[in-house]
Each structure stands twice: as structure tokens, then as C-alpha cells.
Image (cartoon, rainbow, N blue to C red):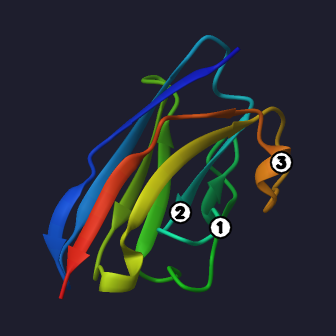
Amino acid sequence: QVQLVESGGGLVQAGGSLRLSCAASGRTFSTDSMAWFRQAPGKEREFVAFISGSGGRTFYADSVKGRFTISRDNAKNTVYLQMNSLKPEDTALFYCAYRKGPFFALDTQQYDNWGQGTQVTVSS
């Protein structure tokens, strides 16, 4: 079982930046994949970004491409999401997710463990 704890959310003005962190424990981290999802009020949880175990492969939702960057530090068992040029429509609860193995997945059901979420609010 993998435990995930997110941090770094907050309130920021449009155009600002935030960096989210997700600390993982409970399993060897470096061979498995991680992702960020988000869920706005009244909407379904949606994919934001994915990173493979080595960090060599990343994928992004079109809505965040060029603004968000996912990265990981396997020595610290931590994955990050750097968010720049934030927009009010980025307001959501952001979740970290763990997926055993190296393969990319968009579907929430293909992720094995989730954190509790961290709130990001972008004011206009």
C-alpha cells in the first residue's frame, strides 16, 4: 500500500504560480508512475499530468500544456507539479495518484492509490 500526502495548494491571483508536492511512502517509488488529477466543484475528476518512474516520460492535458510541469525526486519519494500562468479555471482540488508500473493511463480507475487532495484557488 502506498500513502500519498499532497501539499502546496493555496490562493493565488491569475497569472501567478504555485508548486504542489506529493510525498509517497510504503513502496519502492522509483519504478512506478505518478500523476496529478484535479476536480472542480460539480465536475468529474480530470487528468492533469503524468510522469514515469524514471521521470523520462511525461504527458499533459492540453489545458495545462506549456504552463504546468511535472517532475519527481526519487531520492525524496516526492513528485511535484509546478504551475505557472494560473487561470481562474484552474481552480480545483488537486490530487496526487500512484500507478504501479511504467505505463501511462488517463483513467482514474487505473490508478491504485490517491492522496487526500490540496485546494488550489485562482482569483481573477
**Label 3 neighbour load within 10 Å: few <14, some 14-19, many 20+:** few
Task: Give the numbered dot on residue 44.
Answer: 1
Which one is earlier in the sequence, the residue at label 1 or at label 3? Answer: 1
Residue drawn at x 50%, y 79% as measured from the top left: 64
User: Of the residues shown, which amino acid type is indicated by label 3?
Assistant: Gln
Question: Looking at the rendered structure, which numbered label has been put on residue 109?
Answer: 3
Mark 2–mark 1 Cα distance, whole angstroms, equals 6 Å
Q: Position of residue 17 (x, y in %)?
A: 22, 69
Closer mark to the observer between disc 1 and disc 3: 1
Question: To which residue does mark 2 refer?
Answer: 39
Which element is circle 2 on? Answer: strand
Counting other residues with Cα less than 10 Å from the Cα at mark 1, is it few (<14), some (14-19), or many (20 or more)? few
Q: Split into 4 quadrants, where in the image is the N terminus? A: top right
Tag 2 near tag 1, CB within 8 Å:
yes
Q: Amino acid at mark 2?
A: Gln
N-term mark: 2 or 1: 2
Q: CA distance from mark 1 to mark 3?
A: 13 Å
